[in-house]
Image (tube, rainbow, N blue to C red):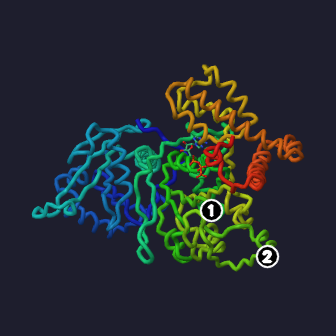
Amino acid sequence: MLQAVPNLGGLSSTAVTLFSTYTSGTQAIYEQWFTNGPFWCASLAASLMLVRSMTNHVIPKVQLRRYIWSPLSSHHTLVINEYCGLTVNHVFKAAEVYLRSKISTPSMEKDQEVTDSFETIKLKWRYSCIRLSSSSKSLDSQKRQFELTFHKKHKAKVTESYLPCVLAQAKAIQDEEKVVKLYTLHGSNSSRTWRWTNLKHPATFETMAMEPEQKRLILDDLDRFVKGEEFYRKIGRAWKRGYLLYGPPGTGKSSLIAAMANYLKFDVYDLELTSIRDNSELREVLLSMKNRSILVIEDINCSVDVQNRAKKLGSQIPYSGLHQKQDEKVGVMSKSITLSGLLNFIDGLWSSCGDERMIVFTTNHKDKLDPALLRPGRMDVHIHLSYCTPNGFKTLTSNYLGIQESNPHRLCGQIEGLMETTEVTPAEVAGELIKSDDADVALEGVVNLLKRKKAESEIILIDQDEGTKKETEMPQTKRQKTKDNNVSKFFKNLSKKVGISHVGSRKRRRQGWP
Ligand SMILES: Nc1ncnc2c1ncn2[C@@H]1O[C@H](COP(=O)(O)OP(=O)(O)OP(=O)(O)O)[C@@H](O)[C@H]1O
């Protein structure tokens, strides 16, 4: 039995006929529904014409007679056609999905009936498929429709409550069944198109190694956003939300985007800004995106010159708004996408095209971004993804080894203790955990990793004696940032002393450094 759902929007659609209704008995009525709920629009003359047209084309005469001319019938029937003119009728589509969940076959057979109930109301659905031209066998020559019959005293309830519930239920079913897609840009210059593949990233909020409170805040924000159509309309803002994910490499920025997409069932558009010619191409590409989607621009400070202008001016580098810079990551010349072009797309006039859109930027260096990009209203939510915490570790051991918090492994306490004082990314921990199914072996690997990292940081303590005394009094996040700098300063200093160039930690280890 279908239950009433509170706060459902009306049967909004573009201005097209969604369904027609007629009552049994001599007083046949033909009604049409338009945008923003029921809107009775057919004049008597138009009604008669439409009834005649129905008589001729839509409903077989026998059935029509039965519905319309039987004077004793107390029932009312809605006819929901597949098309309203040339447009697909979304009530028909919703009914199709909804009824599929009520039958055992993949779709309804011709003339099949399904009974349903809503509160105390009994309803009967019937699917009919009428061939318009006997000579043609193509699908286009068929007129498909649903007929929904119920007692006429329930007409208001059915149209105002039951059908919105059918729509909501169909949307929930479609969301459940939806496979999230990953779009990337293909083609060159004038023929840029988005091509998609299924996004099979398994990340979910359950598998993310994050503080539970941080997860809860993000989920609450996403829930508020998807339910916020009315709210955004009321406050006169485009229904979109900007997220900035920042933190060191391997802390889960990309995984969080996948988890968000899987949670919302939003498609992901992965935009490589360096492949876009200029601001106008950027606009075109963005306008061709669909609603209910997440636009992702990863490593924003590698893709476009969005570095802090104040800092640049301070360093005597002129900021012209038009930049050609060597892209360090992909080794190509970044074209003339400007900061103002990017800001325009985030909150300029045309950014309000489309609904339910999210924009996610990621960066490893938030401090290098121009403050204009960080201003509230542009990036609404800033999420710091940081090193692995004991809570994050618990999630990872549960994911990889099935170890539950209630029954921890003997090494868990030691690892969590080391994590309090040692910086290790969730990716590094995951890298150890995936090496073996044997919890003893995998967790020994994590212990060794942490000890190695701790040893590295102790070398820094000796080298940066003055600085580290101050660091110990800093909160964790500040300490992490400062330490990143200290690591590189230390290795730069050391390199000078021993005559080697500055290298990354993996390379350092290969060269025999701790
Ligand atoms: N917070 C996390 N929770 C669960 N797994 C994580 C997390 N962070 C990293 N991982 C693991 O490490 C791998 C790499 O992480 P991911 O690519 O999401 O990091 P990133 O921050 O986007 O890195 P980069 O800045 O280099 O792009 C993931 O596939 C996942 O297995």
Along the horizontal axis of the image, is 131 left or right of 9? left
Image location of residue 148, percent across then percent down: 32, 48
Q: Which quarter is ligand 1 in?
A: top right
Using the image as rendered, state which of residue 508 and residue 213 is in the foreground.
Answer: 508
Amino acid type of the residue tagged 2 in the rendering: Gln
Image location of residue 62, percent across then percent down: 16, 53
Q: Nearer the viewer, mark 1 or mark 2?
A: 2
| Tag 2 residue | 316
The C terminus lies in quadrant: top right
- Above/below status of 485 relative to 329: above
* Distance between mark 1 and mark 2 Cα atoms: 23 Å
Callout 1: helix, strand or loop?
Answer: helix
Give the crowd class for mark 2: few <14, some 14-19, many >=20 residues within 10 Å: few
The residue located at (25%, 45%) in the rendering is 108
Callout 2: helix, strand or loop?
Answer: loop
Q: Earlier in the sequence, mark 1 or mark 2?
A: 1
The residue positioned farthest toward the left in the image shown? 135
| Tag 1 residue | 300
Q: Could one spot residue 241 in this view of the protein?
A: no
Image location of residue 86, percent across then percent down: 32, 68
Using the image as rendered, state which of residue 342 and residue 507 is in the foreground.
Answer: 507
The N terminus lies in quadrant: top left
Using the image as rendered, state which of residue 395 and residue 10 is in the foreground.
Answer: 395
- Above/below status of 120 relative to 29: above
The residue located at (43%, 73%) in the rendering is 188
Q: How many marks?
A: 2
Q: Is mark 1 within 8 Å of ligand 1?
A: no
